[in-house]
Image: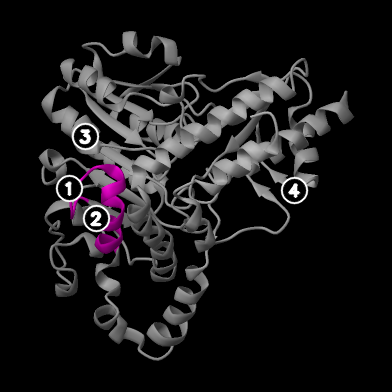
Amino acid sequence: MTDRTFYENLDAIDPLEPLRAEFHLPVDAIYLNGNSLGVMPLAAPVRAKHVMLQEWADDLTASWNKAQWSTLPLQLGNKIAPLAGVGPDEIVVCDSTSVNLYKVLYTAMDIMRRRAPEKRRIVSEKNSAPTDLYIAQTLCTQFGMTLDLVDSDTLHAAIDDHLAILLLTHVNYQTGAVHNMADLTARAHLHGALAVWDVCHSVGAIPIEFGRSDADFAVGCTYAYLNGGPGAPAFVWVHPRHVDQIAQPLAGWMGHAAPLAFDQQYQPAAGILRYLCGTPAILSMSVLESGLDVFHKAQGYGGMTEIHKKAQTLTSLFIQLVEKECAGSGLRLLSPRDPEQRASLVSLTHPSAAHAIIQALRARGVIGAYREPDILRFGFAPLYTRYTDVWDAVMQLKSVLTTLS
């Protein structure tokens, strides 16, 4: 790993390299922010044009059946299912992550209110995704529960017999640290609690097994590693043992057992379809399908096994190279060093110049992200990030640090 040739050779033997051609990538730039917004699949504008000029402009309402608009939420959910370790008809695509979290957290609280009304404690991490905490705060007020925010190193101890619900982001958005979903879910269940997971920063980058982990509820976004586009709809999964127990709180017409009956009395649909609410965002969903289709193609190149392997290699090489080339610069690794405990994300800190460094890198065509108070965040999307991108990005980082010193 002493020169760029080493990284060029890795690109040459990378099984996933052919999939890079499926995406529109910025010219003369190294994009290391795919954990925040994925790049555009080349098929996306073609698909959008067809939906607008044929399905919408010419076919109009006939497209609800002819183009299968009405079943898109479940169709797309079934394309996400292999990435989440569940079977068909268990995931539905709809709304936003925040809205879907409201649905499942409400359901979880309702279950616990009936099952163990004395349990009123929700536990989450202090640096969980803020939107998750906002939704939890809202629902705690409605249900008379308390939200207890703890540090990651005290998380296990916080799971006790007083716990009602464990609410966690599978991958920490600041550090890239990965929680053991199966272990923490089992611990919550041992104490009679439920586990709700946010997988926005893991789906499409590292393997997820909702079923094997015996999780209770999960939500995730599609605009990051799944490359669904800005504002792309999110998805929701509910364990089959819970899915028909409780009617979720946002009772809209699409979640009705017979949407076109226009019944004045709400009757929830069976299964995951009851977690739908309003009319699907057809344009956004159609564009999202282009991103999911690349993951389907990836099955022929090793699928999530190769994607995860490349994610670990990319991030490990980045860390090693930064520590070699930028030693003494004030940069410190914030992400876990162990690749098994790290997602496809590396975060560094700098005590005084983190924001300036990110801005200087951006001016040089290296696109990372800054997060308060002093975090430099770099996301590696295995479907299109090259090994040479690692080398080039670190060389630019080294140069920036030299300029700022």
x 17%, y 22%: residue: 117
Q: Is residue 267 visible?
A: yes
Crowd band around label 4 with a 10 angstrom C-alpha radius: few (<14), some (14–19), many (20+): some
Of callouts 1 and 4, which one flags the residue occurring earlier in the amino acid sequence? 1
Name the residue beneath numbered marker 1.
Answer: 247
Q: CA distance from mark 3 to mark 4?
A: 42 Å
130 and 378: which is toward the camera: 378
Secondary structure of the residue carrying numbered label 3: loop
Check whether the beta carbons of the residues at disc 1 and disc 4 lie within 8 A of each other.
Answer: no
Residue 30 position (above or below residue 145): below
Does the rendering let one see residue 276? no
| Number of residues whose C-alpha sits closer than 10 Å to that of mark 1, classed few (under 14), some (14–19) or many (20 or more) | many
- Which one is closest to the eye, mark 2 or mark 3? 3
- Disc 2 designates what residue? 251
Query: Which mark is nearer the camera, 1 or 4?
Result: 4
Q: Earlier in the sequence, mark 4 or mark 2?
A: 2
Q: In this orientation, which residue lies closer to the viewer: 347 or 199?
A: 347
Q: Which residues are magenta?
A: 73-90
Looking at the picture, which amino acid does disc 1 mark?
Ala
Q: At 48% from the left edge and 68% from the top edge, which residue is drawn?
A: 44
- For badge 4, the amino acid type reads Gly
Q: CA distance from mark 1 to mark 3?
A: 15 Å
In magenta segment, residue 83: yes
In this rendering, the label closer to the viewer, 3 or 4: 4
Name the residue type under label 3.
Asp
Indicate whether residue 54 is drawn in magenta.
no
